[in-house]
């Protein structure tokens, strides 16, 4: 089984649009949006007949008013100013509580419960390109890495159950916890890079993260025509660092036009569809060869 994760290092490079374009070209794939803080792949994939599940993560302190003796200990102990005293009783702000548990452990009247909190929801649905998993975190909630791990685990289960050999994921921008979770177990990371100074800088950071976790990288320079000099610098960087340059995509408004219609650009007659199809073939072949290398390293032969 191959796991291909589309990453970007920064927002706004066109990662999700290209992921949607590849989702239309991939055959026999489970699709997955791992950008759980700001998911938007579902806008183009338009999943239907889905299941939804709660995502529980972390805990919140809750006062049982009847048991609270109003000593104020929790209020003075809380480092996050989540507790106020009202009418002689403790009152905890759900938004401010960070779930550290100090007040729960030290309340002399044992008047605090510490239930698991809902941090978000995750979904499985069908799309015209195949089964699709996505999730959304409640604003301000943490545990995005845990949610990404859960989605990947479910995607693998679904791929096994339905006999699909590829999991194609839209990762998060940046290099934080959800990106690291996205890369865990990935066969290939495909970095969508924008030809700008900040694009190159942020790509460099995410490329180092991939190298650290020994995840091979293929690179696409998106909107390459807006800055040919930067495109050349990225090409030189890839050569120097041993990353495969999968291709360059010229700037076009066709992608936005397709998104407005709820389509992937590869579903339209846009001139860049052929470019993207050629890039997808390279991704497919590179993911195959990396999956084989991995099996060989583990002593399992080369059958995928
Ligand atoms: S520490 Fe316990 S008893 Fe004291 S105010 Fe807080 S909840 Fe109430
Ligand atoms: S669990 Fe921690 S953060 Fe939440 S109210 Fe208690 S002390 Fe404050």
Image (tube, helix red, strand yellow):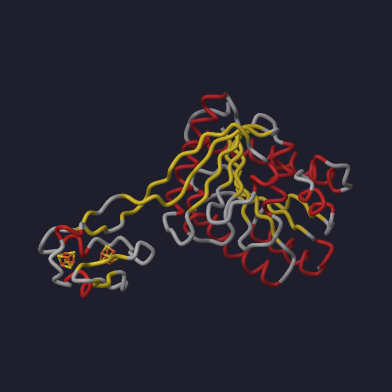
Q: Quadrant of residue 142?
A: bottom left
Q: Give the vertical position of 92 relative to 129 (above or below).
A: below
User: Could you tell me residue 116's position as x and y percent?
Assistant: 31, 50
Position of the N terminus, as image quadrant, is top right
Q: Quadrant of residue 196?
A: bottom right
Q: Residue at x 53, y 39 (%)?
A: 123
Residue nearer the viewer, 237 or 4: 4
Position of the C terminus, as image quadrant, is top right
**Picture mark count:** 0
User: Could you tell me residue 238's position as x and y percent?
Assistant: 69, 59
In the rendered image, the residue lying farthest to the front is 87
Residue nearer the viewer, 16 or 60: 60
Q: Give the vertical position of 218 relative to 124 (above or below).
A: below
In the rendered image, the residue lying farthest to the bottom is 76
Q: Residue at x 28, y 50 (%)?
A: 115
Ligand 2 quadrant?
bottom left
User: Could you tell me residue 113's position as x and y percent?
Assistant: 22, 54
User: Could you tell me residue 42's position as x and y percent?
Assistant: 64, 45
């Amino acid at each position: 089984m191959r796991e291909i994760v589309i990453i970007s290092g920064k927002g706004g490079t066109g990662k999700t649009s290209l992921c949607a374009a590849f989702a239309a070209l991939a055959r026999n794939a489970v699709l997955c949006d791992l950008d759980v803080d700001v998911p938007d792949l579902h806008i183009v994939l338009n999943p239907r007949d889905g299941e939804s599940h709660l995502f529980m993560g972390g805990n919140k302190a809750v006062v049982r008013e009847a048991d609270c003796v109003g000593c104020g200990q929790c209020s003075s102990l809380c480092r996050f100013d989540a507790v106020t005293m009202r009418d002689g009783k403790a009152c905890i702000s759900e938004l401010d509580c960070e779930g550290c548990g100090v007040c729960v452990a030290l309340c002399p009247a044992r008047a605090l419960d510490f239930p698991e909190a809902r941090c978000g929801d995750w979904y499985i649905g069908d799309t015209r390109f195949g089964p699709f998993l996505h999730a959304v975190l409640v604003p301000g909630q943490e545990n995005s890495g845990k949610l990404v791990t859960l989605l990947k685990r479910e995607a693998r289960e679904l791929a096994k159950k339905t006999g699909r050999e590829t999991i194609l994921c839209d990762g998060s921008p940046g290099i934080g916890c959800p990106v690291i979770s996205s890369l865990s177990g990935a066969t290939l990371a495909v970095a969508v890079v924008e030809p700008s100074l900040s694009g190159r800088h942020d790509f460099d950071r995410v490329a180092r993260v991939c190298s650290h976790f020994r995840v091979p990288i293929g690179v696409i320079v998106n909107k390459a025509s807006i800055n040919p000099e930067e495109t050349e610098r990225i090409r030189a960087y890839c050569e120097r660092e041993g990353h495969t340059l999968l291709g360059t995509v010229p700037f076009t408004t066709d992608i936005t036009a397709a998104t407005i219609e709820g389509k992937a650009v590869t579903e339209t007659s846009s001139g860049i569809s052929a470019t993207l199809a050629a890039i997808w073939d390279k991704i497919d072949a590179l993911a195959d060869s990396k999956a084989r290398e991995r099996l060989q390293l583990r002593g399992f032969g080369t059958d995928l």
